[in-house]
Image (spheres, rainbow, N blue to C red):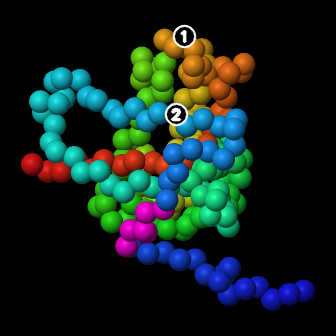
Amino acid sequence: MRPLNPQQLQTKHTNTPPPPRKITMSFTSPTKRRVTPRPYKPADWRVQRSTNHLMQSPISFDYRHTSASLAGQGVAMRDLRLQGNATRIEGANDLVLAHSGLARITFRIIWPGYEHVEWCRTMSIVSDHGAPITRLGLAIQVASSFAHWTEKTQYEKPTSPEWMVSPACVQFKHMYLVSLHVRKRLAG
């Protein structure tokens, strides 16, 4: 029996934001396509009452020990749902939102062709004891939300068939979490 590597035993928790990871804009697999991000635009009455926002650095998600050429390819959300805390992602224990000062975030899914499907959920990003969420914990919450969204959305009629969610088209098992963009509301 070989001894465990001490680095494998350490769990790194830091309150400083991790450096941004390289996020590529294309996939190495010819069967994967990136969904064009659609930023949330509030209704006119909300814009008039809103405050300024600050974009945080994107939070990226990749499998652990991924070669440099495969960086930015994301993590299968199906793996996150099935393997949970056993999913081996890069920087799994990084406290990705500790520096934000937020206790929760509003998570929205705005999918091409399904803009009419309202999906807005509040996610807690600190534990009951006040510990900030890890990259892996956040990824699991996002994957869970997407799983519930696909269950609901597969019965909706899309306005465009290109990204249709159905057993014959895009399915949850095809979805990869590449990055998450967080916008912090500034007091003002």
Image quarter of residue 177? top right
Residue 18 at what x, y percent from top left?
Answer: 43, 69
Residue 18 in the magenta stretch? The answer is yes
Q: What's the residue type where badge 2 is placed?
A: Val
Task: Measuring from the top left, give residue 93's x and y in whole percent.
Answer: 54, 68
Closer to us: mark 2 or mark 1? 2
Q: Which residues are magenta?
A: 16-21
Say few, some or many: other residues with alpha carbon within 10 Å of mark 1 (under 14 / 14 to 19 / 20 or more): some
Name the residue type under label 1. Lys
Furthest residue in direction left, as rendered:
188
Find residue 54 and report its horizontal and vertical position in percent.
24, 51
Q: Which badge, 2 or 1, is on the more N-terminal residue?
A: 2
Q: Any mark on residue 157, and which?
A: 1
User: Is residue 48 depicted above or below 162 in this figure?
Assistant: below
Residue 35, numbered circle: 2
Residue 124 painted magenta = no
On the image, the x and y values in percent for residue 160 come to 52, 14
Quadrant of the image containing the N terminus:
bottom right
Q: Residue at x 54, y 29 (%)?
A: 149
Instruction: Report the label total.
Output: 2
Task: Determine the secondary structure under disc 2.
Answer: loop
